[in-house]
Image: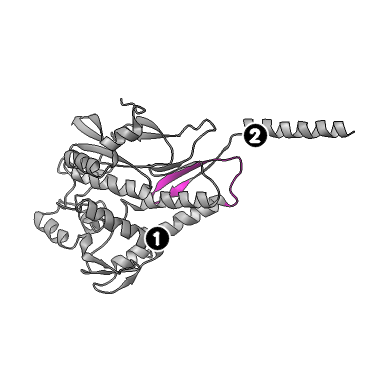
């Protein structure tokens, strides 16, 4: 009888192992937020309890904090605050603004979330697009109060004062990256270490996609408005990547195409040969902001900035219509090696 029980126990354990081997060890969560999609995949045999609701809650909280399209968001309330009136910041908004200040200084102002009035002026923001191109006088006037240096933060970064009531912030170039990081933080708190999080093309990876130690597949899209293929496919682990480009979001006025990326220095849509920029960094928030900054700088200054600051960057540079070349920063060559392939 003892032998029979022992055999039965072994059989049950073996059956569980076999089922586990053939069962797909992934859980996927998809949805829509920030006017874009999100896709989260976790490698685990155990589903997180109530995880879908927790993910939605985190994303809705960020939207309620940083959206410029919601009049009741914390950011909108800050934008509506009169000059020299102290505004108390939530933990999340303080964290994003602190990182924004850091990258604004490091990038010599090429990353600047205070250009919201300029974004609106050119028809890319929350307000109705202007039927005609803004004049040089209009641009110069709006540039006067579209400087991040016009914000005065308390020493502990828990409050801020605007030095001009017309100042408005738009965090679209960093908020998605921050949201990706917050979801990654949630997953780790829930005990998951192998995952990939994507929100509107901004990605963070952790661990591996299988037991063999293979990284997660991440595609860098062809910088063309009519193509949905990948120019490069990489295996990434414990790394984030964010992309900024001019090939899908633009307007045409008087026969000229204007990129949605506004130069905080000149107050105009960028006019350079960059088709897109992908930045690799430990956090997606950093990658997101740096991608925008480099896109504003242009190919030569952007590549030099990446090399000077040891940033892993892939630049897609227009050579002629619908043609581009791929350039890697020195750090990108070290990290990515020969694993990338170009069309």
**Foreground pick, 208 / 125:** 208
Residue under numbered circle 1? 92
Q: Residue drawn at (25%, 51%), measured in percent from left and top?
A: 124
Does dot 2 land on a helix, a strand or a loop? helix
Q: What is the number of the mark on residue 20? A: 2
Instruction: State how the image is colored.
Output: one colour
Q: Residue drawn at (13%, 61%), measured in percent from left and top?
A: 141
Q: Residue 157 at x, y = what percent?
A: 33, 66
Work out which residue is located at the far left of the displayed protein and give it: 137
**Foreground pick, 238 / 343:** 238
Q: Residue drawn at (12%, 58%), measured in percent from left and top?
A: 140
Number of marks present in the image shown? 2
Whether the magenta-drawn stretch holds residue 48 is answered as: yes
Work out which residue is located at the far right of the displayed protein and give it: 1
Residue 248 shows in this picture = no
**Stretch of the chain drawn in magenta:** 31-50
Residue density around tag 2, few if under 14, some if 14–19, many if 20 or more, within 10 Å: few
Residue density around tag 1, few if under 14, some if 14–19, many if 20 or more, within 10 Å: some
Q: Residue 184 at x, y = what percent?
A: 46, 49
**145 sits to left or right of 196:** left
Quarter of the figure that contains the C terminus:
top left
Whether the magenta-drawn stretch holds residue 246 is answered as: no
Nearest to N terminus: mark 1 or mark 2: 2
Residue 102 drawn above or below residue 277: below
Q: Residue drawn at (24%, 47%), measured in percent from left and top?
A: 293
> Looking at the rendering, which quadrant does residue 17 occupy?
top right
Circles 1 and 2, Cβ within 8 Å, touching? The answer is no
**117 sits to left or right of 176:** left
């Amino acid at each position: 009888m003892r032998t029979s029980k022992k055999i039965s126990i072994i059989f049950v354990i073996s059956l569980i192992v076999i089922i586990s081997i053939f069962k797909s060890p992934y859980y996927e969560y998809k949805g829509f937020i920030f006017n874009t999609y999100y896709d989260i995949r976790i490698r685990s045999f155990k589903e997180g309890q109530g995880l879908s609701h927790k993910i939605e809650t985190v994303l809705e909280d960020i939207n309620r904090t940083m959206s410029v399209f919601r009049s009741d968001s914390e950011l909108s309330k800050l934008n509506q605050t009169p000059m020299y009136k102290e505004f108390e910041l939530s933990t999340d908004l303080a964290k994003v603004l602190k990182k924004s200040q850091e990258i604004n200084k490091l990038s010599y102002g090429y990353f600047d979330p205070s250009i919201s009035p300029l974004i609106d002026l050119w028809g890319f923001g929350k307000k109705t697009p202007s039927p005609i191109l803004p004049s040089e006088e209009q641009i110069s006037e709006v540039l006067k109060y579209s400087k991040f240096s016009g914000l005065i933060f308390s020493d502990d970064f828990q409050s801020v004062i605007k030095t001009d009531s017309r100042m408005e912030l738009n965090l679209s170039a960093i908020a998605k990256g921050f949201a990706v990081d917050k979801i990654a933080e949630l997953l780790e708190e829930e005990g998951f270490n192998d995952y990939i999080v994507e929100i509107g093309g901004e990605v963070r990876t952790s661990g591996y996609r299988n037991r063999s130690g293979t990284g997660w597949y991440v595609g860098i899209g062809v910088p063309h408005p009519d193509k949905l293929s990948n120019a490069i496919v990489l295996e990434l682990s414990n790394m984030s990547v964010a992309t900024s480009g001019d090939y899908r979001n633009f307007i045409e006025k008087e026969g000229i195409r204007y990129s949605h990326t506004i130069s905080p220095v000149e107050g105009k849509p960028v006019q350079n040969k960059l088709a897109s920029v992908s930045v690799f960094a430990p956090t997606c928030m950093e990658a997101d902001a740096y991608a925008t900054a480099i896109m504003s700088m242009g190919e030569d200054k952007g590549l030099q900035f990446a090399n000077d600051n040891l940033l892993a960057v892939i630049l897609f540079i227009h050579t002629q219509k619908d043609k581009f070349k791929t350039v890697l920063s020195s750090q990108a060559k070290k990290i990515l090696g020969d694993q990338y392939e170009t069309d």
